[in-house]
Image (spheres, helix red, strand yellow):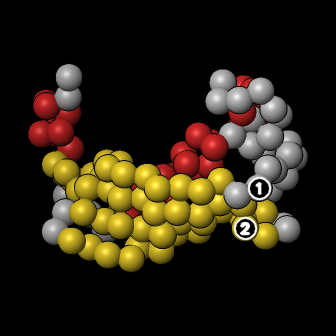
Amino acid sequence: MTAADTAEALHSGTVPVLATPRLIALCEEATCIAVSGELPEGCTSVGKRVQFDHLVPVGVGSDVRAEVTLDRIEGRRLTFSVSVSDGSGLVAAGKVSRVIVDRAAFLRNAR
């Protein structure tokens, strides 16, 4: 974790600790990696919902790791349990839902 990942740098607070938006982005990245190569040709997944608890502050220089588990597949909807830990234990946890979409059609419909 670097200064670029802090609440100060991401304008989500005024303290130099790991920002909640950066934690969420880390978890979303992990969900994308988890389904990489598993989606139908021409499809991707997009974020639908995030439920997230940021439990403890983490300082610059700390190493954090996101872990995800695919809990449910309901049609095109994927629901993941996500957690982030550092060397001292759990930092954050929650759920991320993504939806499988046709990439070209999705981009055509973007505003």
Q: Name the residue under label 1.
A: 56
Q: Mark 2 points at which residue?
A: 90
Q: Which residue is drawn at 32% across and 50% down?
A: 48
Figure check: 17 above or below 4: below
Would you say residue 78 is visible in this rendering? Answer: yes
Q: Which of marks 1 and 2 is nearer the N terminus?
A: 1
Q: Mark 1 near mark 2, Cβ–Cβ under 8 Å?
A: yes
In the image, what residue type sits under mark 1?
Answer: Val
In percent of width and height, residue 53 lies at 59, 56
In percent of width and height, residue 105 lies at 12, 39
User: Camera-side residue: 37 or 85?
Assistant: 85
Q: Which residue is drawn at 65% across and 60% down?
A: 92
**Marks 1, 2: nearer the viewer:** 1
Q: In this view, does 37 lie to the left or right of 84?
A: left
Quarter of the image with the C terminus is: top left
Q: Which residue is drawn at 62% across and 49% down?
A: 23
Q: Residues within 10 Å of mark 1 (few under 14, many from 20)?
A: few
